[in-house]
Image (cartoon, rainbow, N blue to C red):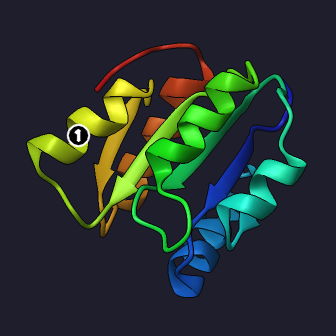
């Protein structure tokens, strides 16, 4: 089976690096980005890939990133992550097609399970 590629887009250096270390230890291929713009310049549709996306970033929000992916017809499964957890935030991310929403701080096992779920084509919220 191919190694799972996980794009990580989060403006918080510590969070981004922590996610990348966890994913590497789990045998995945993390691809961290400190900005949505850098991610959007590099991203392409790939099999066995997903996007771990912070929804509150300074220049471009997670849902705006999702909208750009939708416009470009890039169908990466999205797991939205945020310290903000309210119905409006969840609805905002679901409206753009996020498959899951996880509240920071994210439990390591919950994150790995979520990645495996979305990469395997399941849609849970």
Q: How many marks?
A: 1
Instruction: Name the foreground residue: 22 vs 41.
Output: 41
Whether residue 123 sits left or right of residue 92 in the image: it is: right
Whether residue 55 sits left or right of residue 50 in the image: it is: left
Q: Picture quarter containing residue 39?
A: bottom right
Residue 48 in picture, x, y percent from top left? 75, 27
Instruction: Name the foreground residue: 87 vs 24.
Output: 87
Residue at image position (56%, 13%) is 121
Residue at image position (32%, 41%) is 101
Whether residue 87 sits left or right of residue 2 in the image: it is: left
> Is 3 drawn above or below residue 74 in the view shown?
below
Q: Picture quarter containing residue 70?
A: top right
Label 1, secondary structure: give it.
Answer: helix
Residue at image position (66%, 72%) is 21
Report the residue that reaches farthest toward the bottom: 14
Quadrant including the C terminus: top left
Residue 90 in picture, x, y percent from top left? 23, 40
> Is 24 drawn above or below residue 114 in the view shown?
below
Residue 86 in picture, x, y percent from top left? 11, 50
Residue 87 in picture, x, y percent from top left? 10, 41
Instruction: Name the foreground residue: 122 vs 89.
Output: 89
Whether residue 76 sits left or right of residue 109 in the image: it is: right
> Is 72 drawn above or below residue 108 in the view shown?
above
Residue 96 in view, yes or no: yes
Quadrant including the N terminus: top right
Residue at image position (29%, 37%) is 92
Residue 30 in view, yes or no: no
């Amino acid at each position: 089976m191919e190694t799972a590629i996980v794009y990580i887009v989060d403006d918080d250096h510590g969070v981004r690096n922590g996610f990348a270390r966890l994913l590497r230890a789990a045998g995945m291929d993390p691809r961290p980005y400190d900005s949505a713009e850098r991610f959007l310049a590099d991203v392409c549709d790939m099999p066995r890939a997903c996007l771990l996306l912070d929804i509150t970033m300074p220049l471009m929000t997670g849902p705006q990133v999702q909208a750009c992916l939708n416009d470009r017809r890039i169908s990466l499964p999205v797991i939205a992550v945020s310290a903000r957890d309210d119905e409006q935030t969840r609805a905002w991310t679901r409206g753009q097609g996020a498959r899951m929403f996880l509240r920071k701080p994210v439990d390591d096992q919950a994150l790995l399970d979520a990645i495996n779920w979305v990469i395997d084509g399941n849609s849970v919220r």
